[in-house]
Image: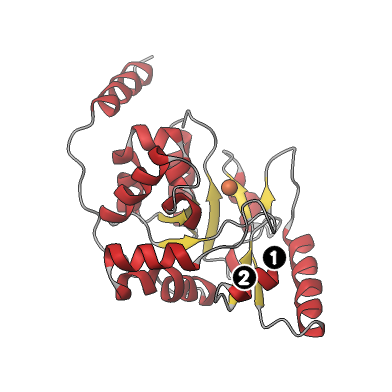
Amino acid sequence: MCRLAVAEGIAEVVCTPHWVYGLYDNTRDRILHCCGTLQRKLVDSAIPLKVHPGCEIRLEPDILPQITSGRLLTLNDTGRYALIELPGEFLHNYVENCFRNLMDQGITPVLSHPERNPGMIRCPERLAGWVGMGVLCQITAASLRGKFGPLIQRFTVTLIQHQLAHFMATDAHAPHVRSPRLSEAVLDLVAMVGPEAAERMVVSNPRAVLAGEKVDVPEPTPFSAHPSCETTSWWRFLTSRR
Ligand SMILES: [Fe+2]
């Protein structure tokens, strides 16, 4: 995977193994240790790739104390950005509270692949609202290339057009399936948004995150009213009155 990444023109990678409650317990200590081991092997093998530690944290109502206590890892261990994977299709209102609590502690949530979340596809206004709160979004290169199907590809394009995509990453899992491919998607991105905006999504914004610095984001372009969101709002209204 590291050799493939280098061949794709990638110089630095953030390794983000999953943390999922009760399934993958990739703690900060474990990831820092493994990342150090990998970096030494890369040097020994003369593979010109720098690896940084990270974690893809599945959102749970109580993740904040796990991050602030140092049990779970922020991106490059700066304490400033946490890569957050949304839970499944139904997104309870606790999501907004979690984001607010994280940001109150100076931790910016970066959503991994929101373009693949059915709840976001149905209600992109909700995602736009989160971005308005300060949440950042990362899209997967393969989503833009259509590897997850035309619906997700179209929604990925929509997110880019509405200024709701701040990073593009490989989300690589293995050498052959979901491999670390980026270059073709970068060309697509350049054709869509131009070289400067594309550069921000794959170089300068990730670099700011690695340094724990602020990422400057453009104002999202609003969506027109979305009927399925209306349904959600009514449902929220009714349940909030119980
Ligand atoms: Fe994920």
Q: Callout 1: 10 Å neighbours few (<14), some, many (20+)? A: some
Residue at x-position 45% and y-position 46%? 114
Would the CB of label 1 be found within 8 Å of ligand 1? no
Q: Position of residue 55 (x, y in %)?
A: 64, 57
Q: Position of residue 6 (x, y in %)?
A: 62, 76
Disc number at residue 239? none
Viewport quadrant of the C terminus = top left
Residue at x-position 76% and y-position 48%? 25
In the visual, does 25 lie left or right of 195? right
Q: Secondary structure at mark 1?
A: loop
In the visual, does 99 lie left or right of 190? right
Would the CB of label 2 be found within 8 Å of ligand 1? no
Residue at x-position 28% and y-position 70%? 194
Proximity of marks 2 and 1: CB atoms separated by less than 8 Å: yes
Relative to 231, residue 92 above or below: below
Does residue 106 appear anywhere in the picture? no
Viewport quadrant of the N terminus = bottom right
Q: Nearer the viewer, residue 236 or 154?
A: 154
> What is the spatial separation of the Cα atoms under label 2 and label 1, in whole angstroms?
6 Å
Identified by mark 1, the residue type is Met
Which quadrant would residue 231 be assigned to in this image? top left
Q: Callout 2: 10 Å neighbours few (<14), some, many (20+)? A: many
Q: Nearer the viewer, residue 44 or 222?
A: 44
What residue did someone put label 2 on?
A: 5
Relative to 16, residue 238 above or below: above
Residue at x-position 32% and y-position 55%? 160
Identified by mark 2, the residue type is Ala
Q: Secondary structure at mark 2?
A: helix
What residue did someone put label 1 on?
A: 1
